[in-house]
Image: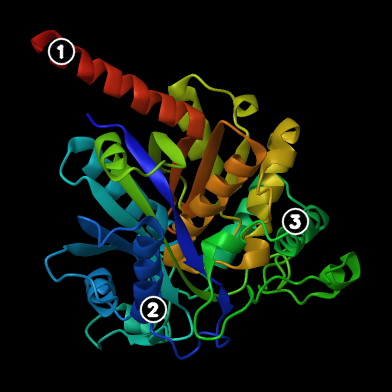
Amino acid sequence: MNRVYLAGGLRSHIGIRNGIFKKIRPEILGGLVAQKVCQKYGIEGPDALICGNAVGPGGNIGRLLLLEGGFSEKIPAFTIDMQCASGLAAIHMAALAVMTGEWSVVMAGGAESASLQPLRRYPENDERSHLRNPQFTAAQFIPGEFGDNAMLLGAERAAKAAGISKKEADEAALISQKRAKDADEKGWLKDVIVPLFGSFRDEAVRKRMTEKLLARAPRVTEVPDGILTAANTCTINDGAAFVLLGSEKWFRSQGIIPSAEIQAIRLIGADPKIPPLSADMAVASLLAEQGLFYSDIDAFEYNEAFAVISAAFRKKHPESASRLNRWGGALAYGHPYGASGAEIMIHLMKILEKENGRYGVVAIPAAGGVAEAILIRHVEKETWIRGSMERKRSFSFPLEVIK
């Protein structure tokens, strides 16, 4: 089996629904980001492209994105819909393909436009047309639940199950905003963000967020004693992000030094009524399988679509709280569904690189109670180069004997 490495990747700025990218189709935005990734690493194109997308118009948007991006028609592409975890599932599938030798280099990630999310309608002969508004935006995730607010209700139930108060959720949101502001002002993500269509910032980052503003934010559900507000829940977003994965042989043949190696992947199923809590369950399972502890991980990137995700982590793992979403999470940047997995993977690689960390974990919970977690190990430049030299020496010895 091949070892799987990550070169790195690029993302667009993240726009708020009906904001900077309100008229830009996701395949156009994603195609441009994919193009820029290839330019960054000096390649014409990957062996294949795998794209996450959750609320597009349907069809194989990954293939459309590849063609819109000007890539060769000979490159295959397909699309994954695992809702919030779509982008991470795309990386999962790409890693398996490289591992088994099907492809040497794959581009994986996602593109999403909530601004252009189409309205759908159940036909008359579908019983659901009579159980909910026949026009809808969100698919059904749980048997018996039909509303567009299913994920909000799941987050409220998760908060209750984990014992998270509104104060704890607001604190998590404030931490995320402050860290994102700091990362932006220090330019830590500047070299992995592609300005497109006049974009110049991540629109959802609120640099003046305060405890008072959090306290005044309107609630977003009618659940009695609910804790979710417009400030401790992520915005609805547009964006695209892609990473490049390949085998060791491919990287060495191209002279590219990878950023990280994928060490392990874990996909789990959990209680569909409280999906936000499944991310940490996936991580706990992955670490146990690898014989690692939370204390062994230098940086965690959880997709905090709801503050309950990061608040629950801090409550359960206080000793690791400072290592969660070091540069802010989805509560600050936003959550462009199908692209988020690649986006936070890119953030994680940059964090490990800057802070000289060794292990990092990315995790995303998704609708219906499934979660993806991926463990990566940072690759040091000197170690990689030394490995190349040792490899050359090992190959030259038999030739010297022949002479």
Q: Earlier in the sequence, mark 3 or mark 2?
A: 2
| 233 left or right of 174 in image | left
Mark 1 highlights which residue?
A: 398
**Residue type at mark 3?**
Arg
Taking depth in this image into account, of 75 and 275 the one nearest to the observer is 75
Left or right of residue 12: residue 403: left
Mark 1 to mark 2 CA distance (whole Å): 53 Å
Q: What residue type is labelled 2?
A: Pro
Residue 313 shows in the view: yes
Please name the residue shown 57% across and 78% down the image.
Answer: 15
Residue identified by numbered label 2: 26
- What is the secondary structure assignment of the residue under circle 2? helix
Which quadrant, please, contains the C terminus? top left
Q: Give yes or no for contact between labels 1 and 3 (Cβ–Cβ under 8 Å).
A: no
> Which residue carries the number 3 mark?
179
| Disc on the earlier residue, 1 or 2 | 2
Image location of residue 138, percent across then percent down: 43, 75
Which residue is at a point 42% across and 30% down the rendered structure image?
A: 385
Q: How far is mark 1 from mark 3, CA to CA?
A: 54 Å
Residue pictured at 56% horizontal, 72% vertical: 14
Look at label 1 and name its amino acid. Pro
Q: How crowded is mark 2: few (under 14 residues within 10 Å), some or many (20 or more)?
A: many
